[in-house]
Amino acid sequence: MRRLSAADAAERTAHLKERVYLTFTALAVVLTLQSHGESAREAAVTLAIVVLGTLLAVLVADVVSHIAVHALLPDRAEFTRMLRTSFGALGAVTLPLIFMGLAAAGVWRVEAALRGSVIALIAGLVAIGYLAARRVRLPAWARMVVLFAEFGLGFAVVALELLAHG
């Protein structure tokens, strides 16, 4: 495994952070939609709006923080990196968006699309957590502690988001 440059590591960190954040946000929305009995079209539109809003919020946060730190607008290369970071997170919610689109088109029932979305989002979080814990240079038992801590914190995030939105 080759060592990344500091710039590459920072960019990968930003990409991963936004994927995790968007996944948690989408998971909270999907879990909430399950309890509200929305139509397939309403559920698909709600998820798409939340995803787009979240991605735009991430982009605005990147631009504003860049301006605050550097006292100038980002150049073309930096803005392109910001766009890649923000909208690169879309991969984390591709399956739920497809599932909701299938429900809106009448191919799936909305309940099945929401259930499939929950499974896909949780599987994505588990995979990211496992891959992150696997790379930590610790004994196997300590990596398991890290993985369970990630799981516990993830569970707490979902519980709090459900409490706020449910």
Image (cartoon, rainbow, N blue to C red):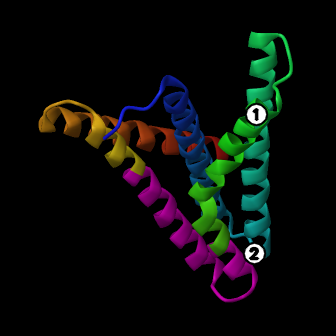
Q: Which mark is residue 18?
A: none
Left or right: 85 with respect to 122? right
Disc 1 versus disc 2: distance between alpha carbons? 42 Å
**Residue at the (66%, 62%) spot, across then down:** 33
Q: Which residue is mark 1?
A: 77
The image quarter containing residue 102 is bottom right
Q: Secondary structure at mark 1?
A: helix
**Furthest residue toward bottom:** 107
Estimate how packed mark 2 is, as few (under 14), some (14 to 19) or many (20 or more) residues with alpha carbons within 10 Å: some
Q: Which mark is residue 39?
A: 2
Quarter containing the N terminus: top left
**Residue at the (81%, 17%) spot, across then down:** 67
Residues in magenta, as a range: 99-127
Residue 104 location (% of width, % of height): 75, 79
Disc nearest the viewer among 1 and 2 = 1
Height in image: 40 above or below 75?
below
**Residue at the (70%, 42%) spot, across then down:** 86
In the foreground, 165 or 147: 147
Can residue 66 be seen at all in this image of the molecule? yes
Residue 114 location (% of width, % of height): 59, 70
